[in-house]
């Protein structure tokens, strides 16, 4: 009897870390539902590449902070593949400004996607992920670093950590793990935007590994948590090359 592939939803899967997670899980044999919100063409290209390589994937648009759209995203996954085993919530936005100068509308934008979005996605995941499955939220090392200019973003990711750890305990007895992966400085468009070469070099040199992270570094840990890591639960796993 042939065992059907496991099924994963990846939010924010069209770019950066999310995209690399989609590619990694597809390579590991998952059927992947790639969620995007604005990058339809990019999402469809990724799906086409996966299918051409013999994998299985579909792209579905949904704003992660919209509970109706997210419910439909999960409905599509269940209609298409029969169930959901893994949810990786990688969608997020960033904003960098001193607390005294930050426009509160920008604070609301960041927290709507990063905090409300995590809550909405995790709520559906908690209701629908099958036994033996995993929920993985993408957090950040920034709450631990407490750097000036990161109040909006770091506080939103601290909330992601809190939601993750509480949900792991709320799902006791379900055989579903819930963890967060907290990347450090990673070479994505989101991180590189607005930074000059000197700033990027300085940040890279601050790591004991003397480089920026690669999205594949995070995808490797996510794949571990999504698959064999059944005894890791309720944790924030830092993927930052040893950055303080």
Image: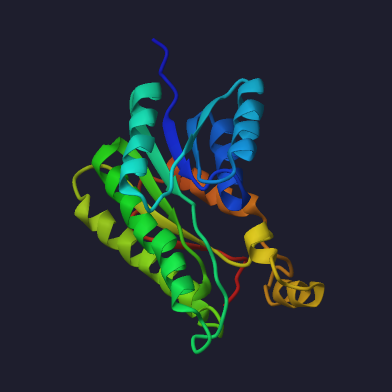
Q: Please state which of residues 188 and 230 is positioned toward the viewer in this rendering.
A: 188
In the rendered view, does 84 fall on the left or right side of 15? Answer: left
177 over 44 or under it: above or below: below
105 over 44 or under it: above or below: below
- Dividing the image into 4 quarters, which one contains the C terminus? bottom right
Please identify the residue farthest to the right as the structure is shown. Answer: 197
Please identify the residue farthest to the top as the structure is shown. Answer: 1
In the rendered view, does 182 fall on the left or right side of 203? Answer: left
Q: Please state which of residues 170 and 50 is positioned toward the viewer in this rendering.
A: 50
Expressed as whole percent of the image width and height from the top left, the position of residue 97 reads 56, 80
Residue at 36% in and 43% down:
70
Expressed as whole percent of the image width and height from the top left, the position of residue 147 reads 55, 83
In the rendered view, does 175 fall on the left or right side of 106? Answer: left
Q: Quadrant of residue 51?
A: top right
Residue at 40% in and 71% down:
158
What colour scheme was applied to this rendering of the protein?
rainbow
- Dividing the image into 4 quarters, which one contains the N terminus? top left
Q: Quadrant of residue 240?
A: bottom right
Residue at 70% in and 75% down:
203
In the rendered view, does 28 fall on the left or right side of 104? Answer: right
Expressed as whole percent of the image width and height from the top left, the position of residue 160 reads 38, 63
237 over 230 or under it: above or below: below
Expressed as whole percent of the image width and height from the top left, the position of residue 13 reads 54, 44
């Amino acid at each position: 009897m042939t065992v059907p592939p496991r099924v994963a939803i990846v939010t924010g899967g069209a770019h950066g870390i999310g995209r690399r997670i989609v590619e990694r899980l597809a390579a590991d044999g998952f059927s992947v539902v790639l969620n995007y919100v604005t990058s339809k063409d990019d999402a469809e290209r990724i799906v086409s590449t996966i299918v051409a390589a013999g994998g299985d994937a579909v792209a579905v648009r949904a704003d992660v902070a919209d509970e109706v759209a997210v419910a439909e995203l999960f409905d599509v996954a269940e209609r298409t593949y029969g169930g959901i085993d893994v949810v990786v919530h990688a969608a997020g936005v960033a904003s960098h400004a001193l607390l005294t100068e930050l426009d509160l509308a920008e604070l609301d934008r960041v927290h709507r996607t990063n905090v409300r979005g995590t809550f909405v996605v995790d709520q559906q995941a908690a209701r629908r992920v099958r036994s033996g499955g995993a929920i993985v939220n993408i957090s950040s090392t920034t709450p631990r670093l407490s750097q000036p200019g990161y109040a909006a973003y770091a506080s939103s990711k601290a909330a992601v950590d809190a939601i993750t750890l509480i949900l792991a305990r709320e799902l006791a007895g379900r055989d579903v793990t819930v963890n967060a992966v907290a990347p450090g400085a990673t070479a994505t468009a989101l991180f590189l935007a607005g930074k000059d070469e000197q700033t990027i070099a300085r940040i890279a040199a601050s790591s004991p590994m003397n480089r920026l992270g690669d999205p594949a570094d995070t995808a490797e840990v996510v794949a571990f948590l999504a698959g064999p890591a059944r005894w890791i639960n309720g944790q924030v796993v830092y993927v930052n090359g040893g950055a303080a």
